[in-house]
């Protein structure tokens, strides 16, 4: 281990809420990252989809620097000349009516929860509106949101938690229908569960939820913070099922890989719940963020990144599914997004990621055994193939170290 890495790794002033891989990055360009020694890596993670446009996209950097020199943070106490073009574009893309900008994904989720609850109180006249969520969900890290997580490590020691949520099995329409009670106001789900290990639900599930919500007068709220903006090979994952949700959360890639930008976009009936003073954020919808996010949307359209995700994703998934290795337990995915589940007999997900890192490929693990692959949508096919070659090699190494050598002679 080099001295720089050791110093940084052991810095006692860094809170230990992450356990980074042993690499010190200093530069990024497109689908490549560079460490402090100048070594190049293929980024197979893109910061959980926050960097779908690739690192340092020239058009996004140009929008960022030009806007930063003009006006960055005037506050929402005033109108500005950038925010409305961004919000209008978000509505056109999602097919929804009204957008409320925030900064992080968790804030967009909190905004959705507030909208749904107020709709429950004011329209449905419920005293205690309840939101159904899916087991295995990931919606962020605020105290309210972790309260309905099924992950012990996210919750442990952080209670007490807010009431008003109930979890149902992910992808199970019948169980969801059975769980609906007199106080249920909304169903809030990820269309594909990312942090749970890239879990793709059965076909027809989201369309079934839409029907169920229509029949029972419930709101359907879809968290596309990770799945949205091209990751699954569609602009939004809900489009795979031709449904129109009442509300959708966006984040991550919305910031073009340079800023935190999120939004909750919904129907007029839902978004009319917000009146002046009822919700806000000092930085949410700032002029700099709006200019960057609008350019990020335009780049995605102009460079056909959604189509790229679909085509490269098909290639990636078919290559992964063709890998014949006992160390591979499962391959799941949609678009340029895959979860590769490793058999713990051969290796932990962490061991795979550390070995990949040595080979110049960066990825991370979720739920101990699932290696996540979500490269920037701009990745060159050759770089994608190189990363998949390294993964195959790594799997073969893990299998051979567990396979007893036959005695010779
Ligand atoms: C990452 C993520 C969030 C939270 O976003 P932050 O920007 O980290 O707060 C919410 N929902 C989903 C589905 C996510 O993947």
Image (cartoon, rainbow, N blue to C red):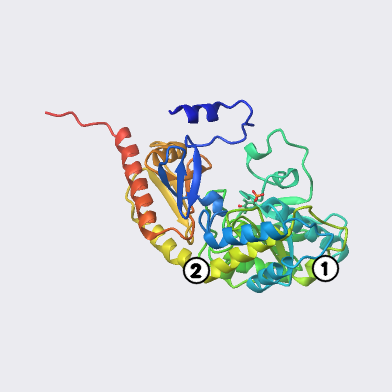
Where does residue 119 sit, x and y in percent of width and height? 82, 63
Q: Residues within 10 Å of mark 2 (few under 14, many from 20)?
A: few
- Camera-side residue: 31 or 322? 31
Residue 163 is at least partly visible in this image? yes
Q: Position of residue 386 (x, y in %)?
A: 35, 52
Residue 93 image position (x, y, % from top left): 63, 71
Label 2 to label 1: alpha-carbon separation: 35 Å
**Residue that carries the numbered disc 2 in the rendered image:** 303
Residue sitting at x 59%, y 56%: 226
Q: Classify the position of the C terminus by image quarter.
A: top left
Looking at the picture, does residue 121 appear above or below residue 6? below
CB under 8 Å between discs 2 and 1: no
Vertical side of 277 occupied by 391: above or below:
above
* Camera-nearest residue between 169 and 69: 69
Q: Is residue 224 visible?
A: no
Q: Nearer the viewer, residue 105 or 403?
A: 105
* SS assignment at label 2: loop
Kindly identify the residue that appears in the image at 49 percent across and 49 percent down: 28
Query: Does the residue tagged 2 have its C-beta within 8 Å of any atom of ligand 1?
Result: no
The answer to whether 177 is drawn above or below residue 135 in the figure is below
Q: Is residue 278 left or right of residue 42?
A: right
Frontmost residue, 402 versus 184: 402
Q: What element does badge 1 sit on?
A: loop
Which residue is disc 1 drawn over? 272
* In the image: residue 356, left or right of residue 167: left
């Amino acid at each position: 281990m080099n001295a720089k890495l050791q110093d940084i790794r052991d810095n006692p002033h860094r809170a230990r809420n992450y356990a980074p891989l042993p690499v010190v990055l200093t530069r990024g360009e497109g689908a490549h990252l560079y460490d402090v020694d100048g070594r190049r890596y293929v980024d197979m993670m893109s910061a959980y989809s926050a960097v779908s446009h690739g690192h340092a996209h020239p058009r996004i950097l140009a929008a960022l620097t030009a806007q930063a020199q003009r006006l960055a943070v005037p506050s929402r106490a005033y109108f500005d000349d950038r925010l409305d073009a961004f919000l209008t574009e978000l509505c056109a893309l999602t097919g929804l009516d009204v957008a409320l900008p925030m900064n992080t994904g968790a804030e967009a989720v909190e905004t959705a929860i507030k909208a749904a609850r107020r709709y429950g109180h004011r329209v449905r006249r419920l005293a205690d509106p309840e939101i159904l969520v899916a087991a295995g969900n990931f919606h962020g890290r605020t105290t309210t949101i972790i309260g309905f997580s099924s992950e012990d490590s996210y919750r442990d020691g952080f209670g007490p938690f807010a009431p008003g949520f109930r979890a149902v099995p992910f992808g199970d329409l019948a169980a969801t229908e059975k769980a609906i009670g007199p106080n249920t106001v909304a169903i809030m789900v990820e269309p594909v569960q990312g942090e749970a290990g890239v879990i793709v639900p059965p076909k027809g599930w989201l369309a079934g939820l839409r029907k169920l919500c229509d029949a029972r007068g419930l709101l359907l709220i879809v968290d596309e913070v990770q799945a949205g903006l091209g990751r699954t090979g569609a602009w939004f994952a809900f489009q795979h099922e031709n449904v129109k949700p009442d509300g959708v959360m966006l984040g991550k890639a919305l910031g073009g890989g340079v800023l935190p930008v999120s939004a909750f976009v919904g129907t007029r009936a839902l978004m009319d719940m917000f009146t002046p003073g009822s919700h806000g954020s000092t930085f949410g919808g700032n002029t700099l963020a709006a200019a960057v996010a609008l350019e990020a949307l335009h780049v995605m359209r102009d460079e056909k990144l959604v189509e790229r995700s679909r085509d490269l994703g098909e290639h990636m998934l078919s290559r992964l599914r063709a890998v014949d290795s006992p160390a591979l337990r499962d391959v799941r995915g949609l678009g340029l997004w895959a979860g590769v589940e490793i058999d713990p007999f051969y290796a932990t997900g962490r061991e795979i990621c550390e070995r990949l890192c040595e080979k110049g490929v960066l990825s991370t693990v979720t739920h101990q055994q699932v290696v996540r692959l979500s490269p920037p949508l701009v990745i060159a096919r050759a770089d994608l193939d190189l990363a998949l070659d390294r993964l195959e090699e790594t799997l073969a190494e893990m299998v051979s170290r567990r396979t007893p050598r036959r005695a010779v002679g």
